[in-house]
Image (cartoon, rainbow, N blue to C red):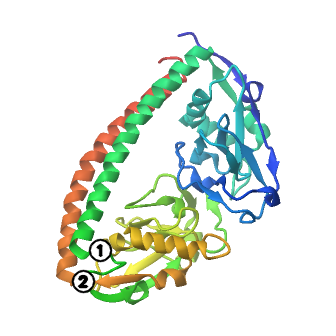
Amino acid sequence: MAVPRRVALGDVAAIERDIVDPTAIETGTLYVGLENIESGGHFVGVRPVDAGELASSKFTFTPQHLLYGKLRPYLAKVARPDFEGICSTDILPVLPGPDLDRGYLAWLLLSPDMVALASSRATGANLPRLSPSALAELRIPLPPLPEQRRIAEILDKADALRAKRRAALAQLDTLTQSIFLDMFGDPATNPKGWAASTVDGVAAQVTDGEHLTPARTHEGIKLLSARNVRDGHIDFENVDYIGADEYERISKRCKPSRGDVLISCSGTIGRVASVETDEPFSLVRSAALVRPKGDIVRTKFLEHCLRTPALKARMLRRANASSQANLFQGQIRELPVYVPPISLQDEFVRATACVALMKVNQQRAAEAVDALFASLQQRAFRGEL
């Protein structure tokens, strides 16, 4: 295929910033914040808001727009909505013109080369942002429209394969939860009559991360937030960084280590994962740390207890009871848990280890599909697909 011509994005798409005043937002309007777009373009936790719930102006968008996260563009938050709504002003609604396919543009902006280019044009030390004008000035390859659609279709199909692998991994998580409920029962009703306690009663420490904005760097020690706490695992890829001095300062308050349990406390509330690494890292306020008393509860037991639907629903209710949707330390400490015998908890830990081995095999298969997708994406925008 011939090398396509290059044009400025602003010549073939409009970056629209139609502002809606918070007083004009109606109950039931779908709202998208940066926390609702995963790196790579998938939505998570989008929900309708109530009138008066949001305090600042937002942008409007339609199913024809592309949503581009301008804050920390290296996080690659670019998504295609199939619904209309409002979004954070840290998200730019982009409306492709008649010569530009939305799917093609989405995959192009998610390609590593374009993510790196956008990041290099961002301004601001701690919270780098790509301005609308800088986004409009990005030069993009523009093959004929049928070719754009062909590329988008290929990458959509490859991404669907990746989604199936992720779904298979999620099913293994469901298996572990099923084992948990079969062995211990629902903590909401405690049908087996285990000794009752609270998170505060079984934890040596409950805290959240740094409250002040840390001084971020381009490399160093990883700084995680709520977005990095996934159900059942911690995302160590899409992170910020801090220097050693900043890490020492923050560590006086919160120093995660192997065996701790992390909870997302802002944005998507109540995702829970245990720490399974000795690599040092730190947290911001949107993530909380629970350090179990090992002679009372095992880490994996506590993780899966907090991940049961009943406790996740309770966390969400408590968070939404606040003026802003945040889960605070006191609310975490009050969460009810039960305490089965350690021997039974250890049996559960062994069962989770067997499931973990199956997950390793699935993960390897998923990585192979990811590698295929990366190859296709790279070739597509070099005119080699």
**Residue 246 sits in which quadrant?**
bottom right
Residue 211 drawn above or below residue 26: below
Task: Report the residue at 63% width, 53% height from top.
Answer: 34
Residue 233 versus residue 193: which sits nearer the camera?
Answer: 193
> Could one spot residue 333 in this view of the protein?
yes
- Snapshot quadrant of residue 365: top left
Lateral position of residue 155 relative to residue 164, left or right: right
Give the total number of marks visible in the rendering.
Answer: 2
Q: From this viewpoint, is residue 209 visible?
A: no
Q: Is residue 345 left or right of residue 242?
A: left
Q: Residues within 10 Å of mark 1 (few under 14, many from 20)?
A: many
| Marks 2, 1: nearer the viewer | 2
Along the line of sight, which residue is nearer the eye, 357 or 30? 30
- Residue on which disc 1 sits: 301
User: Which picture quadrant has residue 145?
Assistant: top right
Q: Where residue 195 appears, x then y in whole percent? A: 28, 89
Question: Circle 2 sits on which residue?
Answer: 340
Q: Indicate which disc, 2 or 1, sits on the residue closer to the N terminus.
A: 1
Residue at image point 55% right, 24% down: 381
* Residue positioned 57% across, 20% down in the render: 148
Question: Could you classify mark 2 by the number of other residues whose Cα lies within 10 Å: few (under 14), some (14-19), or many (20 or more)?
Answer: some
Give percent across and percent down for residue 340. Answer: 24, 83
Residue 324 screen position, x and y as percent: 66, 71
Residue type marked 1: Phe
Q: Is residue 173 above or below residue 340?
A: above
Image mark for residue 212: none
In this rendering, is residue 374 above or below 204? Answer: above
Residue at 46% x, 75% y is 289
- Where does the image place residue 109, in percent across and percent down from the top left? 60, 35
- The answer to the question of whether label 2 and label 1 lie on touching residues, with beta carbons closer than 8 A, is yes
Which is nearer the eye, 258 or 336? 336
Circle 2: residue type: Pro
